[in-house]
Each structure stands twice: as C-alpha cells, then as structure tokens.
Image (tube, rainbow, N blue to C red):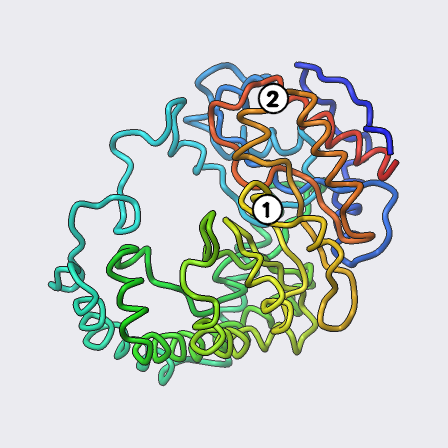
C-alpha cells in the first residue's frame, strides 16, 4: 500500500465548513459504524508557544486564557472527540520539563511521605496506614452510600454539559474519569513505588482486601455514572486510565493480578457491562500480558500504545472483544519515539501504518499520549495535516 500524501504547512487550519461534521464522524465511529473518514481524538500538545502560534493568538495569551486558547486549538487541528479536558495541564510544564515548583508526590520524588501521622518508610508502614485509616474510611463510605442519589447524577450531567458547551458543536465530549468509571487501583502514587510494591509482594491478603473494598465502593458509584450516561444520552464509551506497566511489563506479576485484582476489577465495572457501555483501557508501557485478560473481563478497546516497549499494535487490532466483535482503538503516533526523535517522513509512515493495520471500524487517530515540549513544529504540523488528510479521505 502506498503511503498517504499530505503536505506540511505552518498555517492555521481553517475551521470545518460544517461545525457538526467532525462530531458526527466521532459519534459514528463510537457506535462502531463504518465511516468515510477517520476521526481525530484529543490532540494534547503541551507546547504553549506552538498552541498560540497555530491558533493565531499573541504570545503569552494562553497563561491568562487557557480555556479559550486550548479549545480554539482543538478546533483548529480538527479534534472530533475529546474525553479528558486538559487545558490547565499545559501550564504544568515549561520548555525544559516540569518547573522547579511543581509539587512532587510519593511516586515522583518526594523526599518523605507522611500520611495521617505515619511515616511511609517501609512496607509495614503501608499496611499500617491501610488498616488504620484507609479500610475504615472505605467501609464507612460503602455503608453510608446513597445509591439513589439523583443530585449526584444531576451534578455529573451539569459538568458534562458545561464542557460540551465550551467545546461547541464540532467536538463531541465523551465521558471520562471518576464520575463515570471507578475500579481498584494500585496505590503507588499514594505510598511510593518501592514501599507499596514491596507490601504488595509480602502481604497479598492485605492487597486483596484493599481491592475488594475499592471494588465494592466503585460498583456503587459506577451505577450512578452509568445512570448519568443513560439519562443524559451521552456517548456510551468510557476510557479507564490507570498505569499498571512500565517498559518491561506489568508492575507486578500478572499471575498475582489474576488472583488479587481481576475478579474485583470485573465486579467494579459490571454495571457498565450490563448496560452495554464500552470500556476503553489506556495503555502505558508494555501491557501485552494484561491485554487478553482485560478483554476477558469485558474491556472492548484500547488507547495509547508504546510500540517501542513491546505493545503489538497489529496483533491487538486483530483481537476481538469477548463477544467476537472488533475492538475500538484510539491510535496515535508515538509521543516517546517518532514525534520527538523522528523525521516528518517517519510521522507520515507511522500514520499510514496505524491506518493500514487498524481495526475495520472504531478507529481514532491522534498522538499516543500527551505531546510534551521539545517536539519539532515540523513534526507537529505534519501530524496535524496527516490527521486532516485521513479525516477527509479515510482509508486509501
């Protein structure tokens, strides 16, 4: 198959002729219907200077008007669908990385972590904090949870409608985050990798108790999220976002997840599966061992592939859901290899490959994750023009 031809420019993209076309294209792809073009999903560029340049705003405007400029950028680059809204996130990183005053967590280099008066300096400290503070709170929240909270549903829908109004008619807002999907998580961001993962290995019964309580509360909250999706007539797709792998593989032995985590994960997301809501899993690192297992418990699509770490895009795109249907795939040009280190020809080739090897329906294109400062503007413009080409022309 010949590579697609598209020109790279440094001019501001013209707005769509019909402001409803792009959102409609996204809606059809989310329904797994055949489409003439391939929709683009959120293109989260964090280079503020590039955002201002591409949209024609003067330098320095973004800091005081992030919502206005960010939405203008998403429209200018042809975003059809957005689930996670990240305007202010662009201000957390400068041209040389995170700024010096960026807060650090237990997982990102904090010198000491003290929670509820407990210094988290060992796996035993993790267990002590879970048993003394975390478990009682989870148990109380489960006991006191209002399963018929109409007010909660109204609040969720109010936030979604506010974002949809901000985005306008050409970008479809899709459900995302804790309002719509919760599930048991590894607590490395709270306790730090070393102490938490050591506790995971030494005290599996404590970990399973934690996952079980997290799942019990998550299932209750997910029923309200599902209710909001149905009552609000929102797109029936939710992306789940929790990093469970690095470049070598899963953070913990996947066989332990089979016993300790997957049964509780399935219980947490059962309300979505029973309501026919499609769940998309965000992939960071090498998640190939988990991929078949996630499909088995009901995940029906994937987003964010680090191909250089071993994520086999072609193999995943040939997989099917547990019901035998094609997977939904939100694909993207690599933000850790091709965009920062490749040429414009590499960007073109990777886009062509993503389309050629992608699933027959349910394919979206963009970046594989957030695009940090340092990527050349030539590569960014090549990506944007390529996305426009595939939106207009679809598969060759």
In front here: 367 or 145? 367
Left or right: 105 in relation to 376: left
Residue at image point 56% right, 73% down? 269
Q: Residue 158's image quarter? A: bottom right
In front here: 188 or 51? 188
Q: Please name the residue that numbered disc 1 is placed on.
A: 305
Kindly state the secondary structure of the residue where label 2 is placed. helix
Q: Which mark is residue 371?
A: none
Residue at image point 41% right, 22% down? 95
In front here: 75 or 295? 295
**Residue 363 drawn at (x, y percent):** 75, 48
On screen, residue 100 above or below 191:
above
Location of the C terminus (image quadrant) = top right
**Residue 130 drawn at (x, y percent):** 24, 72
Residue at image point 22% right, 77% down? 131
Seen as rendered, the residue at the extreme bottom is: 143
Q: Please name the residue that numbered disc 2 is placed on.
A: 55
In front here: 171 or 206? 206
On screen, residue 7 above or below 78:
above
Residue at image point 33% right, 58% down? 188
Q: Residues within 10 Å of mark 1 (few under 14, many from 20)?
A: many
Left or right: 84 in relation to 200: right
Location of the N terminus (image quadrant) = top right
Dot in front, 1 or 2: 1
Q: Residue 377's image quarter? A: top right
On screen, residue 132 above or below 122:
below
Kindly state the secondary structure of the residue where label 1 is placed. loop
Q: Is residue 197 visible?
A: yes
Left or right: 50 in relation to 296: left
Considering only order in the chain, which callout, 2 or 1, is on the residue closer to the N terminus?
Answer: 2
């Amino acid at each position: 198959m010949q590579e697609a031809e598209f020109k790279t420019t440094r001019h501001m993209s013209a707005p769509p002729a019909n402001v409803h076309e792009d959102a409609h294209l996204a809606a059809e792809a989310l329904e797994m219907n055949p489409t003439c073009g391939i929709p683009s999903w959120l293109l989260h560029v964090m280079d503020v200077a590039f955002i201002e340049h591409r949209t024609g705003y003067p330098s320095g405007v973004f800091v005081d008007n992030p919502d206005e400029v960010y939405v203008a950028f998403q429209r200018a680059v042809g975003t059809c669908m957005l689930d996670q809204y990240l305007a202010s996130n662009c201000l957390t990183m400068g041209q040389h990385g995170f700024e010096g005053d960026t807060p650090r967590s237990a997982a990102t280099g904090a010198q000491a972590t003290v929670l509820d008066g407990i210094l988290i300096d060992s796996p035993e400290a993790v267990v002590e904090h879970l048993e003394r503070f975390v478990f009682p709170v989870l148990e109380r929240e489960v006991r006191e949870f209002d399963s018929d909270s109409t007010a909660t549903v109204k609040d969720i829908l109010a936030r979604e409608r506010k974002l949809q109004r901000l985005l306008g008619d050409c970008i479809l807002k899709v459900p995302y985050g804790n309002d719509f999907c919760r599930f048991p998580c590894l607590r490395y961001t709270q306790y730090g990798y070393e102490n938490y993962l050591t506790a995971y290995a030494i005290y599996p019964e404590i970990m399973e108790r934690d996952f079980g309580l997290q799942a019990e509360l998550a299932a209750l909250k997910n029923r309200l999220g599902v209710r909001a999706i149905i009552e609000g007539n929102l797109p029936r797709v939710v992306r789940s976002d929790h990093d469970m792998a690095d470049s070598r593989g899963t953070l913990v032995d996947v066989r332990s997840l089979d016993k300790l985590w997957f049964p509780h994960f399935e219980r947490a997301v059962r309300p979505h599966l029973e309501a026919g809501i499609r769940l998309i899993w965000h992939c960071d690192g090498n998640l190939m061992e988990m991929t078949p297992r996630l499909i088995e418990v009901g995940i029906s699509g994937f987003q964010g592939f680090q191909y250089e770490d071993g994520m086999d895009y072609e193999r995943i795109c040939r997989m099917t859901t547990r019901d035998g249907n094609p997977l939904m795939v939100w694909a993207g040009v690599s933000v850790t290899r091709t965009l920062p280190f490749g040429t414009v020809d590499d960007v073109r080739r990777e886009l062509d490959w993503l389309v050629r090897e992608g699933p027959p329906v349910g394919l979206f294109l963009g970046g594989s994750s957030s695009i940090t400062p340092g990527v050349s503007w030539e590569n960014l413009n090549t990506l944007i023009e390529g996305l426009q080409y595939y939106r207009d022309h679809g598969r060759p």
